[in-house]
Amino acid sequence: MQVGRLLLVALVALLAFLQYRLWWGEGGRRSVAHLRGQVDQQAHENAGLKQRNAALAAEVDDLKSGEAAVEERARSELGMIKPGETFYRVVEPQADPATDAQAAAPAEPAD
């Protein structure tokens, strides 16, 4: 009878220990849920990076195969022009602070 109780207490203690490890211990349900969240976040980040890589690969292919893309990039980024073309630059006049102050001041009445 005494051995049976001792065995029962040992089994209940073992069950409690295993339940603790299952729910709160390392490798338990909490840590698995946390790791799944990290995996989902990384998968989302990887999908975005794959999309960016695909866009860059398409741009590289376009630059390797097409002359129009190279020409467009040279015009926009380097300011290059073709032979025989005339380049015009339109510059907006900068406002003079003294002129702006005079224009903003109310006109004095004439005597």
Image (cartoon, rainbow, N blue to C red):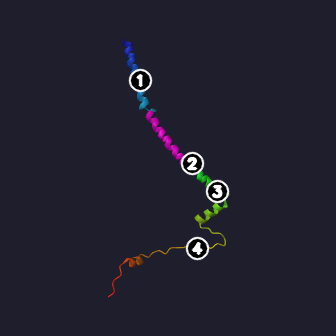
Mark 1 vs 4, N-terminal side: 1
Residue range corresponding to the magenta coloring: 29-53
How many angstroms separate mark 3 from mark 1 (CA)?
A: 65 Å
What is the x, y in percent for residue 3?
38, 13
* Sequence-earlier tag: 2 or 1: 1
Residue ID for mark 2: 50
Which SS class for mark 4? loop
Q: Residues within 10 Å of mark 3 (few under 14, many from 20)?
A: some
x and y percentages locating residue 104 in the rendered image: 38, 77
Report the residue marked by disc 3.
Answer: 62
Which residue type does callout 1 highlight? Leu
Q: Quadrant of residue 100?
A: bottom left
Image coords of residue 76 (percent x, y): 59, 65
Res 80 → quadrant: bottom right
Dot 4 crowding, Cα within 10 Å, few <14, some 14–19, many 20+: few
Asked if 29 appears above or below 74 in the picture, the reply is above
> Is 15 contained in the magenta span?
no
Q: Residue beneath label 4, please?
A: 88
Q: Earlier in the sequence, mark 4 or mark 2?
A: 2
Asked which secondary structure carries label 1, the reply is: helix
Circle 4: residue type: Tyr
Q: CA distance from mark 1 to mark 4?
A: 85 Å
> Could you give the CA–CA distance between mark 2 and mark 1, rounded to whole angstroms?
47 Å
